[in-house]
Amino acid sequence: MLLNFLALIYVSIAWGSAFVLIKFAEETIAPLTVQAGRCLVGFLALLILSLVLRRDIAGHAKHWFAFLVFALLGIVILWITVAFGEKYISAGLATVMVTVSPLVTFIITVFITRTEKFSIVGVLGLVVGVVGLVLVVGVDNILGGSSILIGSLLIILGFSVFAVNGILAPRLASGTDPIVSSAYYTGMATVFLWIFAFIFESPLKTELTLTNSAAEIVMGVFSFASGFVVYYWLLNKAGAFFSSMTFYLMPVVGIVGGFLMFREKITVTQVAGILVVFVGVYLINREKFRKE
């Protein structure tokens, strides 16, 4: 059990710190270039790991279409929206937007695909979750159309698309090796992100320093590659319910990291909003948690 808790904390720190490191790297590197760089590092780390573990890399090539979908929905769109969204909001608040995924997943699976049963408690959780997000973003920011609203909407869009990816993933590539699959779609995403970076930015003019290079490497190896591997291990070892606690701890990591690195402030209303969002997400998934 102790090992499970340590793994849970590790993944939460790995994924939550990415939002802080993105904001840090964007101080000296353009947004698209930041994401393309960390994606390349993550791809190389996953590819090397696949080779070391002697996984069937060639045999997974037949799933190329599924990997292409995952690359676009799970990485490219999400990472681009996060990159530009964090130009307008703090790293801490950006991590809270992770909770949009289960809310959107509930809407799609219950009202569109109808693969999940309708429940009053689930709808109540959805409403509570939305109210929490409103409190986090701020009523004044929403009504006034401030830059915080723009940044929040960008990241909400990204995690909404990510939720669609989560629904499609089990159907398109069931039975595939998670590490090899990640290497494939991360490699594809790397190509797309670098193309966009060269079209809209000037990556070759980027002034690399020891600090921003280290941030890219840490994001690629620690935040992405190792975080994914440990999460998959935790998922198999402790189950979906315990592993889902990661998404409750990530905002805490992001908020604390944002305060320590950038002295980001958070209001009492925003803290209340975060707690309300957590309650909403729990209510949506309550039946699944009970079954497990």
Image (cartoon, rainbow, N blue to C red):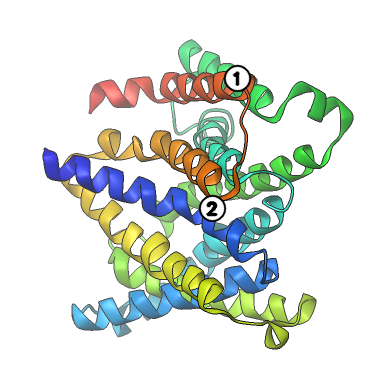
Residue identified by numbered label 1: 268
- Residue 195 is marked as none
User: Quadrant where the N terminus lies?
Assistant: top left
Quarter of image, res 220: bottom left
Residue at x-position 38% and y-position 54%: 14
The 10 Å Cα crowd at callout 2, few under 14, some 14 to 19, many 20 or more, is many
Which sits in the foreground, 264 or 230? 264
Residue at x-position 30% and y-position 25%: 289
Position of residue 52 measured from the top left corner of the image (x, y, whole percent): 20, 82
Label 2: which secondary element: helix
Position of residue 40 measured from the top left corner of the image (x, y, whole percent): 49, 78
Position of residue 32 measured from the top left corner of the image (x, y, whole percent): 67, 69
**Given the current orientation, which residue lies at the most extreme right position?**
144
As displayed, is residue 115 above or below residue 32? above
Position of residue 280 measured from the top left corner of the image (x, y, whole percent): 50, 20
Residue identified by numbered label 2: 20
**Given the current orientation, which residue lies at the most extreme bottom position?**
204
Q: Are marks 2 and 1 in contact (CB under 8 Å)?
A: no
Amino acid type of the residue that numbered disc 2 sits on in the rendered structure = Val
